[in-house]
Image (cartoon, rainbow, N blue to C red):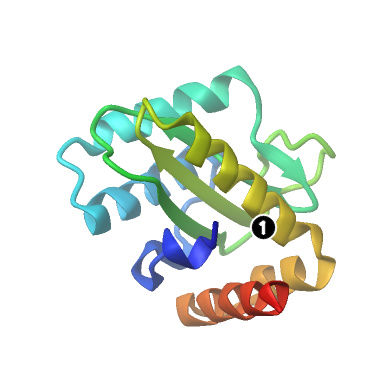
Amino acid sequence: MRLTEILSRDCIKVPLEASTKQEAILELADVLASKAGLSDPDELKQAVWQREQTRTTGIGHGVAIPHGKCKGIDRLLMAIGIPAQPLEFGAIDGKPVELIILLGSPVDQTGPHIQALATVSRLLTDESTRESIKAAKSADDVYQIIAESEAKAAV
C-alpha cells in the first residue's frame, strides 16, 4: 500500500489551529469529512475520539495516529496535521506530539485499516523522514516528502 494512494494534498493541514488533543482530532476529522464528502462528520469524530479514549494513539517520537471506523465511510481515508505547537497527547513516551496522522475506514474493512497503520509506522520509523515531515511548512511539502520516501522504498 502506498500512502499517496489514500492521501490527497487537501487533506493535509499545516499548521493545525488546535491547542488540545481532542481539538486536533476533531479538526482533522472535519478536514477529512469535508474533502471526502462524508455525509455525517460527527460519526467519524465520535469513532476516532471513542477509540482514543480506550488507549492513546500517541506512538512516541512526537507522532500520533488516531484512527476509527464508521459506517459513513466507503473507503480508507487519511488526513495529516502538524500542530502550530506540540500537543500533549498522552503518548507512550510521555513526549508531546508534533505530527498527527488520522485514519478513517469502513467498519467492514479491517485488512486495509491495519495495513495503513503498518505502512504509516514503517514510513515514520525512518528518523530523517519523520523529522522532515514534522518540520514541513506546507501541505505540499508534507505530501512531497511522503511521495519521495515511497519512491525510494520502491527502488
Q: Position of residue 138 (x, y in %)?
A: 50, 79
Q: What is the residue that sits farthest to the top in this orientation?
A: 54
Q: Nearer the viewer, residue 45 or 144?
A: 144
Question: Is residue 48 something one can see in this rendering?
Answer: yes
For the residue pair 127 and 42, the one nearer the viewer reads as 127
Q: Please give the residue where the numbered disc 1 appears in the rendered image.
A: 98
Q: Residue 21 lies in what quarter of the image?
A: top right
Q: Tell me if 131 is positioned left or right of 108 in this view.
A: right
Q: Residues within 10 Å of mark 1 (few under 14, many from 20)?
A: many
Query: Residue shown at 63%/53% (left/top)?
Result: 120
The residue shown at (35%, 33%) is 106
Q: Quadrant of residue 93?
A: top right
* Among the 4 quarters of the image, the one containing residue 155: bottom right
In the rendered image, the vertical position of residue 54 relative to residue 46, given as above or below = above
Regarding residue 87, the answer to whether it shows in the image is no
Three-letter amino acid code at the position of disc 1: Glu
- Residue reaching furthest left? 39
Image spot of residue 73 (x, y percent)? 28, 38
Q: Nearer the viewer, residue 114 or 99?
A: 114
**Element on which disc 1 rests:** loop
Q: Residue at x 74, y 53 (%)?
A: 62
Q: Is residue 34 left or right of residue 55?
A: left
Return the x and y of residue 133 as percentages of the image width and height: 65, 71
Note whether 144 is above or below 106 in the view shown.
below
Left/right of residue 30 with respect to residue 26 in the rendered view: left
- Percent position of residue 118, x then y: 66, 45
Q: Residue at x 55, y 52 (%)?
A: 101
151 sits left or right of 43 in the view:
right
Q: Quadrant of the N terminus?
A: bottom right
| Total marks in image | 1
User: On screen, 57 above or below 83?
Assistant: above
